[in-house]
Amino acid sequence: MTAAPQLSPLCDAAERLLTGALQARSTELRQLLARCESPVEEMLLVAMWDKWAGKITSDGRAMTAMHPGPDCLWRLVVEPQRELVTAGRMFRADFFVYLTCDGPTSHAVCWCPTVVEVDGHEFHERTQLQAARDQQRDRAMLLEGMRTVRFTGSEVFNRPAECAAELAGLLRRPRGEVA
């Protein structure tokens, strides 16, 4: 078994800066977590934050992970509990995730809009009516150009980091593309 590497002590000024930065990031993350409606949603959000090196927008309503590309700055945006309208009906997605690209030849267009749902047994597929409602909503979103990715509550509870990584992999592919 390998011993953990020893970290050198920080000077007092660096320690204060680090502590302040961590407290600010913690506050931003807690604002987003307050928007979640279940423990498994909170777990998935924290896993996305960790996996995607998130930077929180100043309003506490969305997480944005920025990645420089050759021609633009890619932004991966995650909005918990986003209200959306499809087929004339409003609904709230557990997470609305999309990419934008800001550059000299692009105009921050929403690319790959994806609704992420974390389905707990008590609210999804417990009855035929609930399952049918979810399927109808998924089809309505598809007609609006949004895809749906569903995770079970058990998947997120048992493997949150893997769910975040799987979601990131799906977002890298245009809709319908398979490996």
Image (tube, rainbow, N blue to C red):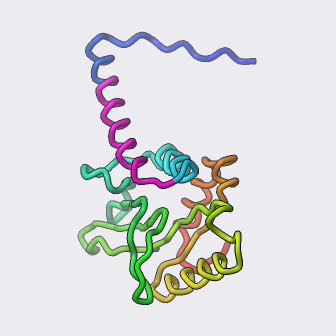
List the single residue furthest toward the right: 1
Q: Is residue 146 left or right of residue 70?
A: right
Residue 140: x and y, percent?
51, 86
Q: Which residues are magenta?
A: 19-37
Residue 143: x and y, percent?
49, 89
Q: Specify the quadrant of the image occupied by residue 177.
A: bottom right
Q: Is residue 121 left or right of residue 13?
A: right
**Residue 105 position (above or below residue 168):** below
Give the camera-side residue of 52 and 94: 94
Magenta-drawn stretch, dominant element (helix, strand or loop): helix
Q: Is residue 17 left or right of residue 2?
A: left
The number of numbered discs placed on residues in the rendered structure image is 0
As for residue 168 lying within the magenta part, the answer is: no
As for residue 27 lying within the magenta part, the answer is: yes
Q: Is residue 71 left or right of residue 158?
A: left
Give the camera-side residue of 28 and 129: 129
**Residue 106 position (above or below residue 161):** below
Q: Quadrant of the N terminus?
A: top right
**Residue 161 position (above or below residue 115):** above
Residue 122: x and y, percent?
65, 62
Q: Write the residue at 70% across / 74% down.
A: 127
Q: Write the residue at 33% across / 24% down.
A: 18
Q: Quadrant of the C terminus?
A: bottom right
Residue 41: x and y, percent?
53, 53
Q: Specify the quadrant of the image occupied by residue 9.
A: top left
